[in-house]
Image (cartoon, coloured by chain):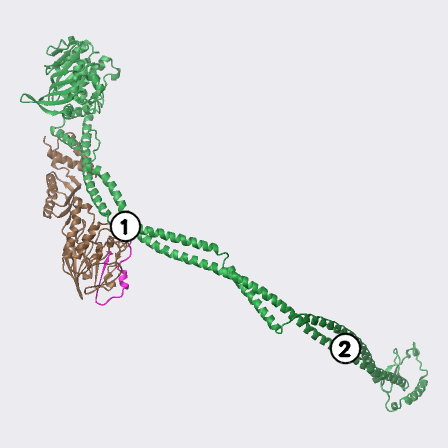
Amino acid sequence: MILESIHLEGFRCFDQPLRLDGFGPGLNILSGPNGSGKSTVLRGLRHALVDSHATTGTAVKEQMQPWGRALSPRLAVVFQNGGQRWRVEKQFLQSPRARLEREENGQFRPVAEGNAAVQRLQAMFHADAPHRGLAENANLGLLQVLWTPQGRPDTPDWGQGVRAVVEASLGAVVASPKGRAIEAAVQSAALAYFTPGGKYRPSEEEKRLDGAGERLTQARAAWREASARGAQLLAVRQRAETEAGAAALAETKRKDAEARVAALSGLREKLANARASEATDRRAFERLRQAMDAIGRERSLVKELEQAVRRLSAARAAIELSMDRRADLAVKSAEFEALVQIGNDAKEWMAAQPARLIVTPEQPIRVEHGAGATGAVPGQEALFPGDGIRLPGIARIRVEASAAREKILARRPEWATHPPELELLRERYKSMKTALDAAKAGFETANSAAERELAAAETVERQLTNELAAVRAELTQRELPPDLADQTDQAAIRATAARALAEELERELATAGGDPEPAVRAAAAEERAAKSALERTLQEEARLEGQIELTATQNLYGRVTELEEEEAVLNAAAVRYRRRANALQTLRQAIAAASAELAAALPERLSGPVSEIWGRLTGGGPVALNAQWKPAAVHVPVDHLSGGEAEQVAFATRLALARHLAREERQLAVFDDAFLATDAARAAIILEILQEATAELQILILTCHPERYDRLPAAVRMELGPRY
Amino acid sequence: MRFLHTADWQIGMKAASAGRAAPRVREARFAAAERVVALEADFLLVAGDTFEDNGVDRAMVERTAAILARFRGPVFLLPGNHDSLVPGSVWDHPSWWQYANLNVVRAAGAIPVPGGTLLAAPLTGTHSRNDPTLWLESVPRPPGIVIAMSHGTVEGIDPETEHYPISRSAWRRAGLDYLALGHWHSTAIYDGGRMAYSGTHETTRFGERASGNVLRVTLSGSVAIETLPAGTIRWETLDADLRGPGELEPLRAALQALPDESLVRCRLSGLLHAGDRAALEQLRDIGSRFLHFSLRTDGLLPAAGSQWMEELPPGAVRAAAARLLGAAREGDQSASDALLELMAFAARVEP
């Protein structure tokens, strides 16, 4: 832009209007003493071109209003830009307004008012709107480069806008106008999807999607819940059936338990009765049995007595028999005596018999009788002692024997024909003797036993007779029924039956499992629980039926359908939007990356003009610029330079950049007391350089030392007087 | 015996793929139903999925019942897997008792129909691995013509999936004269017409091969099936894989030939030549007259080496184009889209 005039009114030190006209297209020097308002003019120019008229606040007042005056600052600037003349008018604080006019056919005509005017101006200078308040240096766009503020001309961190503009300006060296137009079109299209700061702007569909999604989630949940109710109802109905069965079963169980209680009670009663009956019958039986026992004992005693009598008779008979035996024994004893006499006679007889001696050496002499019997001769041993055998007296023996025989025959004439046989007699003797001894012993034994038996029988008979008398006396005392046996049997049967019944009842009670009352209570509780559960289930069934009926009328599925379709439509639109946003972002980034690659080569390209200016000023070598387009080093690192040299290298950098910015269109470069540390020799060179730079730049120098610029005769000079 | 066999009306269905035309798609199903009931036959079988869901608007239930009631003969409706017979289902609505000719199959069994007997059993759940026709084999075969109606999937699908699998020979095994099926939305006739899917009466989605029909079946010893069109809305998918310049032209012609009552899904892939960019825009213009039109260019890449890239201004823009082309060839969808955008900008922006 090229400045033509500026009008300030009610602004800082200019409470009275100040109008500066006639700025030339080349060098302009605005001079005045300290406090004359030179920098205020520059600040007014900045507010007029960049700041919003609507900016308010204490800081704004302090920076704009005259001290102690509540005036509304008014600024007006006429300038050229883009080959056209423009006029901007702004009023701040009270009744703020802004208007941008363009000259058409010799007259300024409004092209934008208010914010639109502000934005249009900001766009001209690629400036940013500050977040709040007045513009900072970083918001100034091209002006950050072109306008060197009062004091030391440093090289600040160029704002993003500056970098973009300068890169674009430098890029234009290799890019055609169509390339820039495409980039601008891409940027413009991208601005529909992203903020200038690059933040994604969600589409209306995307914004609505969140709400739609939420509504759909809710609708689906309601629909699923409603859809599930049919199955729930089926399950509940099945459960109700099961629970009804369980309730009926519980009721039956309870009734059974109650019946068991009643039955057990009856059983116990029966048991008590049975036990009482048993006791009664048993007592009756006992009495009857005792009577029966007494009768039995009487009968037994009678029988025993009869036996005792029989025994007594037998004993007496045995004694009589014993007497008979004694008589018989006497006979047998007489017979035996007779036999003994015979025997003795026989012995004599035998002794009187001719005998034949049998003499055997070394053996006793034996006499052999005529009958052939043999035997030793008693006393004959003595007859043959030692070796000498002598038989004296044989004849005498024989004589004596004969005499003896005669004598015997006198008693036993039969022996004359039938001599006795001694051996037979002996045998008979022995036999009779044995028999007689046995008979004697038998008699004595039998007699003795019979007597003992008789005594014992008599004792028993007496005892039994006494006992029988006692039993009969006892029986006489009892009143015995005529059918005692039957009654006893019946009593026994009754007692046994009662006992069997009692035992059966006891077994029954034992198997009944103890006290049935808890079972009744448990069954009743179970029944109540089952019926209660059934009741709840039936209520749930009714509730579900009601809900199903209700939800059937709510068209929940239709709602889901509508929302799903809405979501699909929104989603499709959002996808398309995001896809285009991504495409534009990708395109923008690709162009930016390509630009960055090109820009990466820029510091080297920029350093040429900077080095040229620096060389003219100092005679020094090349200036190295860093990626931020700031001087990094000359022959030494820049932070080792003197104040004047630092001022000069910053000037060289700014001027070189300004020349690039002015490549397409002349621009206003301002230096506000920017060379205070520069010596006179180098200041002279700066003036030469500035003089040359007027080929591309309108230059405005603000200074309180106008004499330093006396060597610039072509410069337009303006002077401000002291303000107070 | 002559009867109509239809199924899968899917009344109240969602049509998210139809975009803003979804209500129109739903409405068209009623119009198609009107055309079905206007046909001549002794009776009408609806073999399941009359409704999309048991939760559909009850006004739709009433309207459907009223349409069916206009059929000049008895109507037999089978609850399918979408509208299974459960408490609170559409079949609880009083409309089904309001009209004398409407008969909802509520239990498995034999139902007398004009000229014979119908065997049918309602579906009582959304999913099952059980063959819903197995029970037919154990039913004593009544005298005369015996037909059956069922709903499920005839083979061709994993039997483990829960879609009511039906044997390919179900009709023969059950000794039926005809087995009317529902579930698949395209018409399919098996074994000379002894078993068939009528398909839906009005197409429900993209990709259905032969939907939008109703079958009229005539049984008299032999079987004769007429496939009668009932649907109106066309669901068209047009795909094109572009290679050379000018290849959008056949697609444009195909689009122009379609009626307005169409839902059109167009998918482009391959290479877009600079000369076809305008034709691409034309497709959008043509598509605007359809009920719904979507054009996907995901798979489309500006043809490399074509003149438009060489004509890009030198500097950052041309360098960016080269950079994007490399990324697009690597499969970067966003780079591909960016390149298409650049193509459009380059065409629009004047130097």
Position of residue B139 in the picture relative to residue A388 (left or right): left
Name above or below for residue A506 compared with residue B346.
below
Whole-number angstrom distance, CA of label 1 to CA of label 2: 120 Å
Q: Could you tell me if residue B329 is visible in this image?
A: no
Q: Earlier in the sequence, mark 1 or mark 2?
A: 2
Name above or below for residue A701 compared with residue B282.
above
Instruction: Look at chain B in the picture and name its colour.
Output: brown
Q: Position of residue B267 (x, y in %)?
A: 16, 44
In this rendering, the label closer to the viewer, 1 or 2: 1
Q: Could you tell me if residue A667 is visible in this image?
A: yes
Location of the N terminus of chain B (image quadrant) = bottom left
Q: Which chain is green?
A: A
**Magenta region includes residue A13:** no
Magenta-drawn segment = B126-154
Dot 1: chain letter:
A
A345 or A389, nearer to the observer: A345
Instruction: Rate crowding at label 2 as few (under 14), some (14 to 19) or many (20 or more) other CA atoms within 10 Å.
Output: many
* Three-letter amino acid code of the residue under disc 1: Ile
Q: Residue at x 48, y 61 (%)?
A: A263
* Three-letter amino acid code of the residue under disc 2: Ala
Name above or below for residue B16 compared with residue A443.
above
Residue B302 position by quadrant: top left
> Which mark is on residue A315?
2
B340 or A284, nearer to the observer: A284
Q: Position of residue A52 (x, y in %)?
A: 17, 23
Name above or below for residue A431 compared with residue A709.
below
* Number of marks: 2
User: Which residue in the protein does label 1 denote?
Assistant: A548
